[in-house]
Image (cartoon, rainbow, N blue to C red):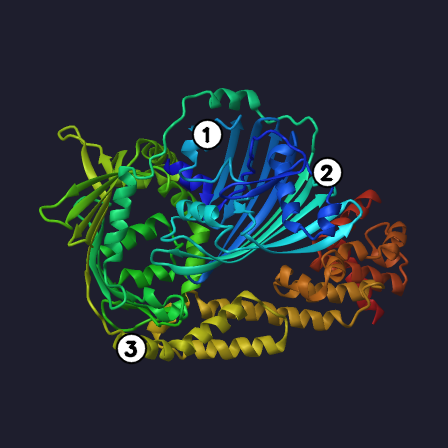
């Protein structure tokens, strides 16, 4: 039953087209009962439009859906947009439904920031309905299913009831050719009593929603055949601890395949499942009662004036060296004014987290396992004594850690919304929330010695436990995690347990643990170990946040300059530009950094001075080269120009990615492949003259001597050119090296002067 609630309806009951009255057809007869009016066998809209009898148009439209059409298909899409606390919460949903004679089928899909839900419905002759979700198939009688949902017998569109009294106003939006479109304004109470029931049951609302506006637009042909409909509704929903929030629903539905043969997917399988005996729905089952008692106990704490939470979180990685985090938290949450003020102003929080002496050992172990990934964060955590968290009442947290020597205090500031975004992006909250509504835990309640005292024990169900064991085994089968497995002595997963204690009707304490089986040695048995052990005591206690907030704000203000410098330095070191202005900005920032106290430099988490020196050298070399490059026309290079460019290019170690971004792809291709631009014409023509060892007898002209010398000079800088010269000498049968040739050419060159 719990799966039925959560899967079928999440804030919004997903579309379920319904069948109508089964009375014998009559000629344009209007029937009425307690909830609705319906017109049967109407032939044309014309007379009703002339009389502006828009109500009868709606009744005939609905009759066509329920009884008048043998087959049709609908495709529905929609959204519900709301603001839950301080972040937007949107649901989008789609549905494909098929009516095929007396058979009904629907496949629904909804997506929100927390979860994705897929559900199928199958029904024949309105006797029983099959609800399928997560490979689980539940069969209910339609009468039984009515306990939690409008389903089969009501005259409505997506749960909104049309009656003489519920239709407040109507307006013809379109009357062209075969298409009629009428917008209906419905009464916020009389049209929504079934929708309210579903929303409250499915969304876990603390009360029935209050509708502010309901508009349904029906599009039909002149014979009342449905074409489409749209729904726009606004309502306010209330949930425990979250107060009231306004939600806006928009739905679009289109009809097709009317009176055509339509196959229902996988019908033989669904038909077999529908043949199973129906289940019963117990809306007052024991587990629901326990959850209600727990919710009441939670609400009984005085959140408006303040609640104190004290306790500890223990992590047992290595036996005998438990890492314990002491927790002391004071806070308030003014639920009463949640609809009147900004939520930011309704929360107050001050928490102190204090690790024991084994915390440094845990950090050392983490640094060993994670290598250098922690960086300077690991250095700060190693000496951590306390961490204060102070909420400023305006949407941000101050984080104030102190180390053992209290030499420095680093203050961070984080937005509440950013923290929530991080959680949503890094944790599968959808699976957690979805699972928590579907048999994640078994609940066992034990009454105390007096009224208002009881405990509730929560343990994982077998199905969830099996899933967790599978995931943990997969984790430890990864070779990268073998060291953790060895340190734990892990053999198998045992359990997750929670014990909630209630005194005088109010939540008093929470104990929770994550337990595993540690493998015993040859002389000892296996034993159960609590890897994580949480204990919290709760009580009403007013608290004044002013002093701690003032202290945190002053510390943060004093650190703002450092935060600004860190931002500037990070930008300069991570986004390098080739310009003298950039170098000036870098020099200024590094000068400010070097003037800081050593303990504040740790906050930057990088070797600023050496990084800056390396970048500065790269930029200066690029600037010098670009200055040389500007002297030449890269589309018309001679060997003399190539020689000078090669000297400049290879003189210093240029960072190629930086150079490429500065001079562009085409110029970079030229300077990176200067050897392909060398002109060997003079050298090739002079080869035939190079006979004998006496170079003075070769008869080389002065132009040839100078040209060959230039190419040899290039080969000293560009090695591939030297290789090319040697190959040319060998192919011409000249038994000399490039070095020998250089000596002879230098002799001839000196004689020229």
Farthest residue toward the left? Answer: 449
N-terminal of the pair, mark 2 or mark 3, is: 2
State the residue at coordinates (67%, 38%): 28
N-terminal of the pair, mark 1 or mark 3, is: 1
The residue to which callout 1 is attached is 135
Q: Can the viewer see residue 32 in this picture?
A: yes
**Mark 1 against mark 2, which lies toward the viewer?**
2
Q: Quadrant of the N terminus?
A: top left
- 502 or 701: nearer the viewer: 502
Residue 43: assigned label:
2
Task: Give the image location of residue 159, x and y in percent.
Answer: 52, 44
Q: Provide the secondary structure element on which disc 3 rests.
A: helix
Residue 123, compared with residue 397, is above or below; it is: above
Residue 551: assigned label:
3
State the residue at coordinates (48%, 23%): 274
Task: Give the image location of residue 514, x and y in percent.
Answer: 26, 42
- 602 or 273: nearer the viewer: 273
Task: Give the image location of residue 596, x and y in percent.
Answer: 38, 78
**Mark 2 against mark 3, which lies toward the viewer?**
2
């Amino acid at each position: 039953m719990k799966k039925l609630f959560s899967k079928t309806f999440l804030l919004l009951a997903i579309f379920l087209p319904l069948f109508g009255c089964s009375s014998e057809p009559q000629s344009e007869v209007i029937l009425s009962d307690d909830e609705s009016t319906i017109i049967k066998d109407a032939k044309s809209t014309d007379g009703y439009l002339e009389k502006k009898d828009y109500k009868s148009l709606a009744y005939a439209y609905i009759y066509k859906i329920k009884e008048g059409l043998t087959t049709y298909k609908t495709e529905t899409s929609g959204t519900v947009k709301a603001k839950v606390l301080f972040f937007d919460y949107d649901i989008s949903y789609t549905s494909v439904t098929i009516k095929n004679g007396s058979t009904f089928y629907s496949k629904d899909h909804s997506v929100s920031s927390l979860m994705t839900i897929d559900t199928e419905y199958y029904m024949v002759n309105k006797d029983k309905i099959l609800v399928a979700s997560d490979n689980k198939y539940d069969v209910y009688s339609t009468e039984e299913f009515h306990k939690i949902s409008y389903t089969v017998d009501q005259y409505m569109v997506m749960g909104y009831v049309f009656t003489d009294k519920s239709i407040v106003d109507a307006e013809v939006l379109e009357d062209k050719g075969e298409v009629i479109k009428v917008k209906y304004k419905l009464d916020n109470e009389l049209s929504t009593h079934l929708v309210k029931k579903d929303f409250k049951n499915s969304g876990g609302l603390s009360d029935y929603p209050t509708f502010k506006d309901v508009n349904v637009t029906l599009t039909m042909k002149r014979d009342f055949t449905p074409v489409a409909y749209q729904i726009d509704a606004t309502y306010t929903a209330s949930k425990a601890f979250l107060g009231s929030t306004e939600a806006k629903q928009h739905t679009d539905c289109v009809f097709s395949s009317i009176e055509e043969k339509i196959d229902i997917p996988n019908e033989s399988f669904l038909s077999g499942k529908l043949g199973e005996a129906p289940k019963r729905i117990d809306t007052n089952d024991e587990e629901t009662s326990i959850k209600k008692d727990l919710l009441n106990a939670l609400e009984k704490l005085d959140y408006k004036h303040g609640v104190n939470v004290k306790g500890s979180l223990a992590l047992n990685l290595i036996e005998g060296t438990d890492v314990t985090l002491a927790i002391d938290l004071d806070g308030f949450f003014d639920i009463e004014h949640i609809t009147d003020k900004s939520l930011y102003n309704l929360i107050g929080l001050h928490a102190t987290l204090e690790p024991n002496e084994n915390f440094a050992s845990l950090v050392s172990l983490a640094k060993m396992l994670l290598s250098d990934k922690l960086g300077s964060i690991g250095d700060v955590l190693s000496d951590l004594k306390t961490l204060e968290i102070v909420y400023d009442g305006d949407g941000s947290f101050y984080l104030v850690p102190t180390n053992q020597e209290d030499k420095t205090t680093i203050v961070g500031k984080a937005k509440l919304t950013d923290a929530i975004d991080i959680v949503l992006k890094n944790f599968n909250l959808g699976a957690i929330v979805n699972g928590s509504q579907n048999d994640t835990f078994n609940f066992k309640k034990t009454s105390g010695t007096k009224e208002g005292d009881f405990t509730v024990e929560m343990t994982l169900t077998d199905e969830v436990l099996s899933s967790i064991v599978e995931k943990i085994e997969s984790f430890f089968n990864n070779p990268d995690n073998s060291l953790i497995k060895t340190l734990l002595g892990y053999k198998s997963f045992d359990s997750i347990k929670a014990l909630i204690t209630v005194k005088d009707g109010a939540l008093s304490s929470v104990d929770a643990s994550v337990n595993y089986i540690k493998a015993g040695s040859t002389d000892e048995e296996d034993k159960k170990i609590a890897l994580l052990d949480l204990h919290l005591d709760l009580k009403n206690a007013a608290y004044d946040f002013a002093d701690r907030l003032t202290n945190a704000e002053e510390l943060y203000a004093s650190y703002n300059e450092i935060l600004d410098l860190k931002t500037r330095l990070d930008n300069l070191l991570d986004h390098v530009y080739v310009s003298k202005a950039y170098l000036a900005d870098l020099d200024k920032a590094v000068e400010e950094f070097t003037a800081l106290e050593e303990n504040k430099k740790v906050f930057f988490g990088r070797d600023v001075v050496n990084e800056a020196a390396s970048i500065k050298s790269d930029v200066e070399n690029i600037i010098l080269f670009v200055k040389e490059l500007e002297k030449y026309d890269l589309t018309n290079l001679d060997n003399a120009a190539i020689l000078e460019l090669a000297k400049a290019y290879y003189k210093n170690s240029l960072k190629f990615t930086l150079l490429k971004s500065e001079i562009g792809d085409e110029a970079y291709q030229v300077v990176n492949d200067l050897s392909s631009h060398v002109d060997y014409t003079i050298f090739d023509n002079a080869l035939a003259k190079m006979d004998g060892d006496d170079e003075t007898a070769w008869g080389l002209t002065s132009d040839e001597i100078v040209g060959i010398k230039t190419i040899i000079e290039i080969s000293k800088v560009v090695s591939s050119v030297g290789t090319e010269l040697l190959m040319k000498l060998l192919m011409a049968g000249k038994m000399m090296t490039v070095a020998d040739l250089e000596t002879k050419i230098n002799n001839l060159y000196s004689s020229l002067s």
